[in-house]
Image (cartoon, rainbow, N blue to C red):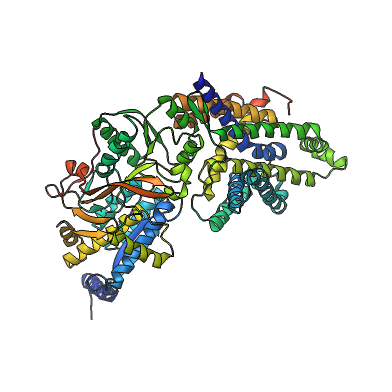
């Protein structure tokens, strides 16, 4: 038999293709959920419980027979609190492992490091963290609270309790910069004034001069979107200087990583926050969630806002898959855009089709003896900040993070 | 008036913490010409020793001022016997070896304590100066640094052991000829240097969140302070810590903490360009 080169190439290609077929179907047996989180390093207080929540949610889905009759498998990478590892592992997840969906990213810097990779490879992406808002990307769903949901309720409450002159201390990267601007907007909207804004790189841990400076500006209130373990020193040094009972503190981040349990009651009591979740929420869903967590991990101490967001994000995705009857990206997005809702540990949470963000309950809370006591609850708050700038129904190709102008 | 006092305290605090951070390195580098790149990790271990001891119910001051220096000093002793003593006089080799040690210590601390931020709260409360609140702990650090400098002068100038140590540093062969074993003197010096690093780490522990890689944050400042100080051990340490502490705080108050750090580094570059052998090669010559 004689073969010319073209025939030879054609046949070998067909053969190799046929040889690969069984493995391809085998891999498709399980639905693959990629998880990319900092489970070690300075952000591990955020990442570890998020990882536990991911496992809990997936175990629960599998215990109920999986999705579309298939088991869900987690493929996870620990990014070690190193932003450079995010892009590397995102490539691995999307190109090598070719997962069906990715849940993960903690800091806004990490989200922006991987978001475009997800978009390019058409891998559906869930960012389950409270953040500065404004990301308009059809490929991404954000299931955490945004400034309009959080700052808009927190700032007026805190200002009413203290006064109109506000000093902002923020982490120096996109989250802190943008959130600081939101805080400024809501302070002004409520007739207040921002007397100073300071930004700190994430590794700054000496706040001595800052504390003196704050006393010079003598504000009525401090709002502190500080992030990570090093910045926790601020609250410690603030209390050590004896300032805690002189100028009230509000934060948009303290407590999402259970920082209220690391700080002693003397350091933490009275700090004002606003989130979607508190362990002290008295609902049957929260009780059931805490029991499940207890059974899986021994105690519920580690549960925090971001863990619950992650858990709810995965359940929302699972609802979308069920409704779509498919694991492919486009049908799932279309199913999610019908406004899918679940009742999670933090209450009812619904996808907002226009922005791919969520409508959820927000609670104003105060730290009290290492817990968060709910002061006031606002039901079903819509992400109006992102809605004002983003409409994925009209403009599905949008791929921008909008920032607020003042 | 109040504010100038508060800023003065902050400046003294910055100088004092530089003295504390650098003292251990200054002893080991200044007296033995050993570059200890694991200095930051010795500090980190001092911090963990303190937190562990406090967790076991020890009084926090006992833990910081006694337990941590002894624990880290003993670790230093082991390191000296096993590694450093084989490398005296080989500058590059000691750098490489101690860098390896720093990686080992970070790894060990991660295995034992986990890569999680820990900390203890500050044991001293703040107080008011006029309209301002000042951290009482800053005063504690200033006092410890002053006592430390006085103790170092007293030991090196006033005791026979200090005399022998200084003699060995200048001419180890002559000290050996007079019947003193340089090997043992180096061992004791390294123990003291490590203990000082441990003390610094312990005292700074309540101010920060501690992770196994915390040491890296101190190493640059410590080296800059010691190198810019020059040949005299104590005069060099105090003069360069003062220079950098003041520069850092002036810019921190005038602009921002980030600019303060930048100003410190720029000051170091200018200083070393003008005085390549360090401050004490031109001023305070021949002092201790």
In front: A167, or B240? A167
- Would residue A284 appear left or right of A235 to someone viewing this image? left
- Would residue A270 appear left or right of A331 to someone viewing this image? right
- Would residue A26 appear left or right of A233 to someone viewing this image? left
- Would residue A131 appear left or right of B232 to someone viewing this image? left
Residue A242 percent across, percent down from the top left: 49, 34
Residue A339 percent across, percent down from the top left: 16, 56
Q: In percent of the image, x 31 and y 60: which residue is there?
A: A286
**Quadrant of the drawing holding the C terminus of chain B:** top right
In the rendered view, would you say A354 is above or below A49? Answer: above
Q: Residue furthest right?
A: B178
In front: B252, or A20? B252
Residue B178 percent across, percent down from the top left: 88, 40
Q: Is any atom of residue A155 visible in this view?
A: yes
Residue B7 percent across, percent down from the top left: 52, 24
In front: A44, or A120? A44
Q: Residue furthest left?
A: A394
Determine which quarter of the picture holds residue B150.
Answer: top right
């Amino acid at each position: 038999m004689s073969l010319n080169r073209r025939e030879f190439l054609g046949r070998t290609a067909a053969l190799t293709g046929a040889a690969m077929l069984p493995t391809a179907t085998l891999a498709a047996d399980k639905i693959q959920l990629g998880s990319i989180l900092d489970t070690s390093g300075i952000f591990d207080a955020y990442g570890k419980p998020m990882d536990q929540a991911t496992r809990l949610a997936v175990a629960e889905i599998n215990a109920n027979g999986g999705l579309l009759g298939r088991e869900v498998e987690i493929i996870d990478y620990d990014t070690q609190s190193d932003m450079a590892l995010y892009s590397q592992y995102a490539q691995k997840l999307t190109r090598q492992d070719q997962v069906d969906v990715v849940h993960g990213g903690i800091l806004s810097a990490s989200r922006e490091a991987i978001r475009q990779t997800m978009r390019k490879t058409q891998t559906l992406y869930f960012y389950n963290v409270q953040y500065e808002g404004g990301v308009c990307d059809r490929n991404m769903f954000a299931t955490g609270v945004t400034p309009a949901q959080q700052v808009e309720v927190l700032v007026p409450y805190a200002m009413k309790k203290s006064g109109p002159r506000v000093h902002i201390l923020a982490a120096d990267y996109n989250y802190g910069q943008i959130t600081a601007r939101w805080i400024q907007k809501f302070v002004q909207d409520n007739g207040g004034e921002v007397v100073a804004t300071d930004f700190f790189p994430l590794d700054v841990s000496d706040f001595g001069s800052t504390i003196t400076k704050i006393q010079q500006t003598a504000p009525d209130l401090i709002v502190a979107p500080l992030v990570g373990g090093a910045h926790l020193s601020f609250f410690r040094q603030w209390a050590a200087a004896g300032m805690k009972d002189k100028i009230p503190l509000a934060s948009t981040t303290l407590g999402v990583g259970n920082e209220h349990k690391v700080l002693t009651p003397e350091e933490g009591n009275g700090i004002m926050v606003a989130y979607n979740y508190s362990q002290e929420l008295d609902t049957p869903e929260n009780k059931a969630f805490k029991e499940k967590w207890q059974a899986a991990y021994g105690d519920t101490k580690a549960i925090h806002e971001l863990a619950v967001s992650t858990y709810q994000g995965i359940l929302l995705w699972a609802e979308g898959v069920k409704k779509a009857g498919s694991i492919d990206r486009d049908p799932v997005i279309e199913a999610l855009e019908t406004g899918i809702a679940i009742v999670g540990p933090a209450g009812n949470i619904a996808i907002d089709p226009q922005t791919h963000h969520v409508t959820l309950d927000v609670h104003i809370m105060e730290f009290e003896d290492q817990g968060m006591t709910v002061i006031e609850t606002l039901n079903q708050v819509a992400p109006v900040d992102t809605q004002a700038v983003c409409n994925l129904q009209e403009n599905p190709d949008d791929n921008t993070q909008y920032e607020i102008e003042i | 008036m109040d504010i100038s006092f508060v800023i003065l305290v902050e400046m003294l605090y910055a100088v004092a913490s530089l003295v504390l951070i650098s003292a251990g390195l200054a002893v080991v580098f200044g007296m033995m010409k050993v570059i200890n790149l694991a200095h930051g990790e010795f500090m980190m271990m001092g911090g963990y020793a303190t937190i562990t001891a406090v967790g076991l119910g020890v009084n926090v001051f006992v833990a910081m001022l006694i337990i941590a220096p002894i624990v880290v000093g003993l670790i230093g002793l082991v390191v000296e016997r096993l590694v450093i003593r084989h490398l005296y006089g080989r500058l590059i080799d000691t750098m490489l070896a101690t860098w390896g040690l720093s990686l080992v210590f970070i790894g060990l601390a991660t295995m034992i304590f986990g890569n999680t931020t820990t900390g203890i709260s500050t044991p001293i409360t703040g107080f008011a100066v006029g309209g301002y609140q000042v951290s009482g702990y800053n005063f504690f650090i200033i006092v410890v640094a002053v006592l430390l400098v006085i103790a170092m002068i007293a030991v090196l100038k006033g005791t026979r052991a200090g005399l022998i140590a200084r003699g060995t540093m200048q001419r180890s062969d002559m000290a050996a000829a007079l019947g003193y074993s340089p090997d043992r003197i180096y061992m004791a010096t390294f123990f003291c240097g490590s203990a000082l690093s441990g003390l610094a780490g312990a005292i700074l522990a309540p101010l920060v969140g501690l992770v196994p890689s915390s040491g890296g944050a101190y190493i640059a400042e410590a080296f800059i302070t010691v190198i810019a100080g020059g040949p005299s051990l104590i005069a060099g340490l105090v003069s360069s810590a003062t220079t950098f502490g003041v520069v850092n705080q002036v810019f921190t108050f005038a602009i921002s903490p980030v600019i303060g750090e930048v100003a410190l580094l720029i000051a170091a570059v200018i200083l070393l360009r003008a005085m390549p052998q360090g401050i004490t090669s031109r001023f305070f010559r021949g002092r201790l």
